[in-house]
Amino acid sequence: MDIILFPIKWVISWIMYGIHAVLTAIGMSSGSGAAWVLSIVGLTVVIRILIIPLFNKQIRAMRMGQEIQPEVQKLQKKYKGRTDAVSKQRQQEELMALYRERGTSPFASCMPLLIQMPIFFALFHLLYAVRPISTGDMPAIGAVNKTVAEEIANSTLFGAPLSSSLGTAAEYNLPTNVRIVAVILIFLMMATLFFSQKMIMTKNLPESAQDPDNPAYKMQKMMLYGMPLIYIFSGFAFQVGVLIYWLTSNFWNIGQQYWLITYNPTPGSPAWKKRQEKIRAKRIAAGLPPEEEPEEPVQPRVQPLGKERSKKAKKKHAGKAPAPASTPLPPEEVRGPDGLTDAERAQKRYERRMAERQRANEKKKARQAKANRNKKNRNF
């Protein structure tokens, strides 16, 4: 594990060291102190900024998964009660084919979490190695040499060293401080995770996805109550520095989800309806119609007649008697050698162009679908 995580630990050490150098340059005290605590907070912010593209991909995957839920439920009804291996295999194959056709994956929404887990464990191992490095029992890891390790080991949050945990509280001078700080951080982690999950379920899920019989909704409900409970057991072993990283990440999630729910909610969700009402109220206040008017269809352009065709048309209709003065004259229709008027000819050209565009769009969609089917899944 250490060999696999060593490159990540090396990068993390230099990011923390760089953030610490910036903090001391703007006036914070060097050496042991609050600058190293804020370095872990800064590390979290840097990591979360770097994975914003993955967050956007996660949102697209979640929305695509919500859109195809009716089709997924049809598949489940189709194979309901079939417990044989062949039926299960066919159901799985049809389900994965449905995801490939839509260009998504059931695991795409887990990508930010999967990316963060190696970083999380690398920070855990790095803080675990701080004390051995400070005593010279372990070689340096990146920027964390003996001097830096001593500074990190002596940096505390309300008396609790960054490398301490509930499990190792008895090894430090102030074990009570370590226990109190760790318990408070674990409680805050549970509360922030529950709040962020609850915000998604109550505000950013469409009504179609809130069916109690929907397996995805059931899974989200289990995670709402189950994930915070995991912190009780995992928090016992994690150091104070790791708990700070995790808590900062939870606060980042809340802010990110608040922005998403406010400005880019899922269509059909309560947040989306609320946003539509605000947009409608703004349009009314500005003196505009409550709803945007649909664009008018483009009318085909009538081609003007050339000189030769105008002469032919005049000769053709020269011998015709004019209509009675009491009745309005109908518009003169000039037909060419093909038997069509200019308006009919323009309409045919317009229809031909639209048909060509439609065929081109269908070919493009077919190529895209084929590329999605053949593309190697990189979400793992």
Image (spheres, rainbow, N blue to C red):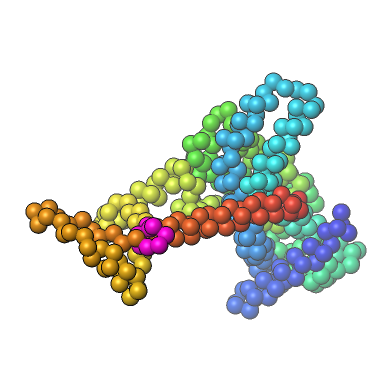
Q: Residue furthest bottom?
A: 25
Residue at position x 60%, y 31% in the image: 73
Indicate whether 270 appears above or below 376: above
Q: Is residue 245 above or below residue 213?
A: below
Q: Is residue 7 visible?
A: yes
Residue 27: which quarter of the image? bottom right
Task: Judge whether residue 229 can be spotted in this image.
Answer: no
| Left or right: 259 as drawn, with respect to 123 | left
| Residue lying at the far top of the rendered structure | 81
Instruction: Locate the N terminus and report the quarter of the image it occupies.
Output: bottom right
Depth order, front residue of 359/318:
318
Residue 46 in percent (x, y) is at 65, 65
- The residue at 85%/65% (across/down) is 133
Q: What span is colored magenta in the figure?
A: 336-344
Q: Residue at x 68, y 46 (%)?
A: 100
Could you say where residue 110 lies in the image, as x and y percent from the top left? 68, 48
Instruction: Judge from the rendering whether residue 235 lies leftward or rightward of residue 146; answer left or right.
Output: left
Image location of residue 63, percent across then percent down:
56, 46
